[in-house]
Image (tube, coloured by chain):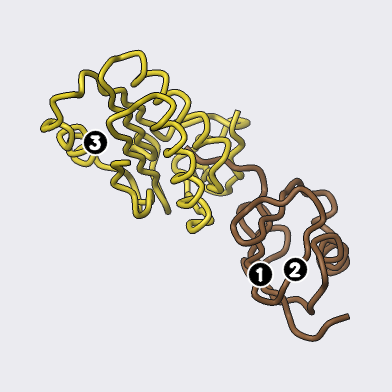
Chain colours: A brown, B yellow
Amino acid sequence: MVNGTLSLQFFGRLMDLTGCSTVSVPMVGDTDELRQRLFEQYPALREATYVVAVDRKIVRQNTPLTEAAEIALLPPFSGG
Amino acid sequence: METTMQTIFIQGAISTTMVAQSIQRYATDMAIGAHSCFIGQVRADLVEGKEVVAIEYTAYQAMADEQLQILAADIYKRYTLNGIIVKHSLGMVAAGEICLLVLAVAGHRRAAMDACGELVDRIKNELPIWGKEYFAGDGYQWKINQ
């Protein structure tokens, strides 16, 4: 476990499920650990469809995180 | 590449004046023979008897603008376009109002039309934008793209 925090943003329907648009969580090392932590904090996310973006790029595989990382959880897009 | 885009986002509905100005912008380029334009309008869908009266758009703006630049650069090159304009609403847009403008201009119609079609599909599929459909009276649902 590393000291520090990660900031994340929720968008779309995920704001309803978590009740917030941004949150800080204790530092974790990678996106798999982050998912686990978020499932504990927000059980409703287990049923949700979303992708994780790190520094504005969608990551499909486990990805290391730093405190400066810009992290966002994105539900299916519905623009236009 | 010639684009107008620092950001594609406009607060509220896109005006028909803005559509006209986008077309006018290319009037001085004599190599252009075709404009293909897509205009998205908020539809008053009926969902279980409730009418959609407006859509509120939110976006991960920084990522959407970056993604659009990459997408537009790819399409601009592949279709040999003379220009692309994309505008998307943020915030509330009432049924009947315009929420998306995509303009592709080229020397010939086929390139302009194909590029415009691909742009619209990819904007809907690849840009982190979300619509929240408000019903008449009360309630909402998160829009799902087909």
- Secondary structure beneath dot 3 equals helix
Q: Between label 3 and label 1, give the one nearer the viewer.
A: 1
The answer to whether residue B30 is left or right of residue B35 is left
Q: Are marks 3 and 2 on the same chain?
A: no
Q: Residues within 10 Å of mark 3 (few under 14, many from 20)?
A: some
Residue farthest toward the left in the current orientation of the protein: B28
Q: Are marks 1 and 2 on the same chain?
A: yes
Q: Quarter-wise, where is residue A37 in the image?
A: bottom right
The kind of residue on which mark 1 rests is Ala
> Where is residue B84 shown, x and y percent of the image?
33, 35
Indicate whether B121 appears above or below A27.
above
Badge 3 vs badge 1, beta-carbon distance below 8 Å? no
Tag of residue A65: 2
Badge 3 vs badge 2, beta-carbon distance below 8 Å? no
- Secondary structure beneath dot 1 equals loop
Q: Which residue is mark 1?
A: A69
Tag of residue B22: none
**Marked residue chain, label 2:** A
Q: Quarter-wise, where is residue B96 in the image?
A: top left
Q: CA distance from mark 3 to mark 2?
A: 42 Å
The kind of residue on which mark 2 rests is Leu
> Where is residue B110 shown, x and y percent of the image?
35, 13
Q: Which residue is mark 3?
A: B19
Badge 1 vs badge 2, beta-carbon distance below 8 Å? yes
Indicate whether B84 appears above or below A74.
above
The answer to whether residue B142 is left or right of residue B2 is right
Q: Between label 3 and label 2, give the one nearer the viewer.
A: 2
The kind of residue on which mark 3 rests is Val
